[in-house]
Amino acid sequence: MEKKELNFRSSIEGFPKTQLKTTETVEKNPLPDQSSLEAEKQHEGLVKGIENFDKQALAAAKTEEKNPLPDSQTLTEVKQHEKRLSQISDFDKTQMHHTDTVEKSTLPDKTVITQEKTIEGISKFDKGLLRHAETAEKNPLPNKETIEQEKRLSASS
């Protein structure tokens, strides 16, 4: 263990100092600035003032609890509400008559359903499935000679 320590010390002592880089040291001021000192003094003064406060200097205060009575309008509203509740709870259900409710179901007729299916089929149709087709005209229009010939025949008749 001592050999390692001696070797370590000798390597440190024999280290060439020319290989070290020069650096500038920046001194940091650990002391607080003037505003920090003033803020700290003010805080300490407040704490001491609270600790040394004389409780005997306080005057006794009486608190008045105000419980205002409701006005006449509020009283009438409360009475009406209670009256309605009592009427609902005391209602005689035997005076009611039985009624059958008819629920109408407005389903679309068959023509509307088929129209919707057709419109849906048209909108979802894949045009890529179509093939190109050449149309051959089998009933051509008559040329000028044929028209004139027929005019002559109809005029002579």
Image: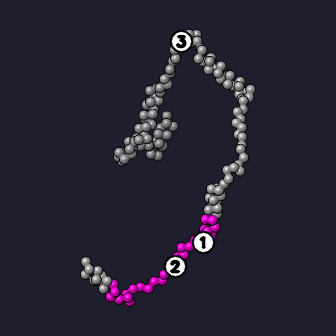
Please give left or right for residue 6 compared with residue 80 in the image. left
Amino acid type, mark 2:
Glu
Amino acid type, mark 3:
His
Indicate which disc residue 33 carries.
1
Is 131 located above or below residue 22 in the figure? above
Q: Does residue 71 appear in the picture of this structure? A: yes
* Disc 3 crowd, CA 10 A, few/some/many (<14, 14-19, 20+): few
Instruction: Measure the C-alpha gap from mark 1 to mark 3.
Output: 92 Å
**Residue pointed to by mark 3:** 98
Instruction: Measure the C-alpha gap from mark 3 to mark 2.
Output: 100 Å
The N terminus is located in which quarter?
Answer: bottom left
Quarter where residue 17 is shown: bottom left
| Highlighted range, magenta | 12-41
Amino acid type, mark 1:
Asp
Return the residue found at the far front: 56
| Nearer-N-terminus badge (2/1) | 2
> Which residue is more in the foreground, 18 or 34?
34
> Which residue is more in the foreground, 114 or 93?
93
Q: Position of residue 86 (x, y in %)?
A: 62, 18
Indicate which disc residue 16 carries.
none
> Which residue is more in the foreground, 67 or 31?
31
Q: Does residue 135 appear in the picture of this structure? A: no
Please give left or right for residue 14 compared with residue 156 in the image. left
Mark 3 lies on a secondary structure that is loop
Residue under the point 60% across and 14% down: 90
* Disc 1 crowd, CA 10 A, few/some/many (<14, 14-19, 20+): few
Q: How many marks?
A: 3
Mark 2 lies on a secondary structure that is loop
Mark 1 lies on a secondary structure that is loop
**Residue pointed to by mark 2:** 27
